[in-house]
Image (tube, rainbow, N blue to C red):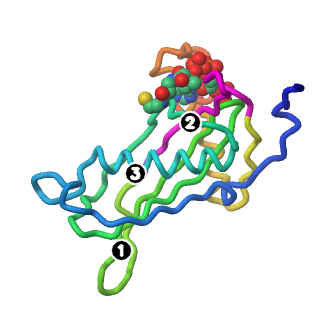
Amino acid sequence: MQKTKYEDMQAKTPSESKTIMTDLVLPSETNPLNNLFGGDLLARMDRAASIAARRHSRRVVVTASVNHVAFNRSIPLGSVVTVEACVSRAFKTSMETVIDVWIEDRESGHRTKANEAIYTFVAVDDMGRPTPIPALQPETDLEKERFEAALRRKQLSLVLAGKMKPSEATELKAIFTEK
Ligand SMILES: CC(C)(COP(=O)(O)OP(=O)(O)OC[C@H]1O[C@@H](n2cnc3c(N)ncnc32)[C@H](O)[C@@H]1OP(=O)(O)O)[C@@H](O)C(=O)NCCC(=O)NCCS
């Protein structure tokens, strides 16, 4: 069977991968302060982001790295939590996903941003080998901003994982040398 080259694949937009998961915080998911346990939130974000990566690539995906997590606000027991994820940039076989976490006021319904994170996924074939994915075409200003910054984050992640020499991280170095 002829393999599909990633250059032949149709680019997709971030909205095509957008994934929204809403759920409650139950007592078994909290820490001694009755707030959502951090590990539980990481798993919720991993699930939503992996669905987004799968929607973009239409392949099996694995989590390659967690590049950034900010636990800005605690999430109390009983909260309604919404996790929103979408692909922010696709490379050859890997893709960056951004995740925003919101909590909802019970009476007003007003949403407040509680957390954010960035995870990287790799699309793999039946043998678990990295496989090419479609490009991403950002549309809005925010999507374009995230797209631009994603290469720096990829290089930082690779340098920290010992998979890239700092001297090869050209985009990353540019941050420290810009006037
Ligand atoms: C992720 C995995 C497929 C990468 O395999 P690999 O042999 O390192 O493959 P490559 O070096 O060809 O890398 C594949 C892609 O992943 C990217 N990548 C690998 N490690 C990365 C990291 N730490 N941060 C960001 N990107 C990374 C590479 O840059 C490459 O991207 P590109 O093709 O888009 O340019 C492999 O390490 C794996 O299967 N890990 C286990 C994943 C898993 O089980 N996750 C579940 C949670 S533990």
Which one is earlier in the sequence, the residue at label 2 or at label 3? Answer: 3
Q: Which residue is mark 2?
A: 121
Mark 3 sits near ligand 1, with its Cβ under 8 Å away: no
Q: Residue at coordinates 58% horizontally, 53% vertically from top-left?
A: 86
Residue 155: percent from left, percent from top: 57, 27
**Residue found farthest to the bottom:** 108
Q: Residues within 10 Å of mark 3 (few under 14, many from 20)?
A: some
Spatial CA span between label 3 and label 1: 16 Å
Q: Is residue 131 above or below residue 150?
A: above
Q: Residue at coordinates 49% horizontally, 52% vertically from top-left?
A: 48
Q: Amino acid at mark 3?
A: Arg
Q: Magenta part of the protein: which range?
A: 116-132
Residue 44: image tag = 3
Residue 142: percent from left, percent from top: 61, 58
The residue nearer to you, when weighing 179 against 27, is: 27
Q: Quadrant of residue 109?
A: bottom left
**Residue 118 located within the stretch drawn in magenta:** yes
Q: Is residue 14 above or below residue 50?
A: below
Q: Residue at coordinates 33% horizontally, 51% vertically from top-left?
A: 41
Task: Please report contact status of discs 3 and 1: CB closer than 8 Å, yes or no.
Answer: no
Residue 58: percent from left, percent from top: 70, 44
Quadrant location of the N terminus in the rendered image? top right
Spatial CA span between label 1 and label 2: 28 Å
Q: Amino acid at mark 1?
A: Glu
The residue nearer to you, when weighing 112 against 85, is: 85
**Residue found farthest to the left:** 32
133 left or right of 129 in image: right
Q: Amino acid at mark 2?
A: Phe
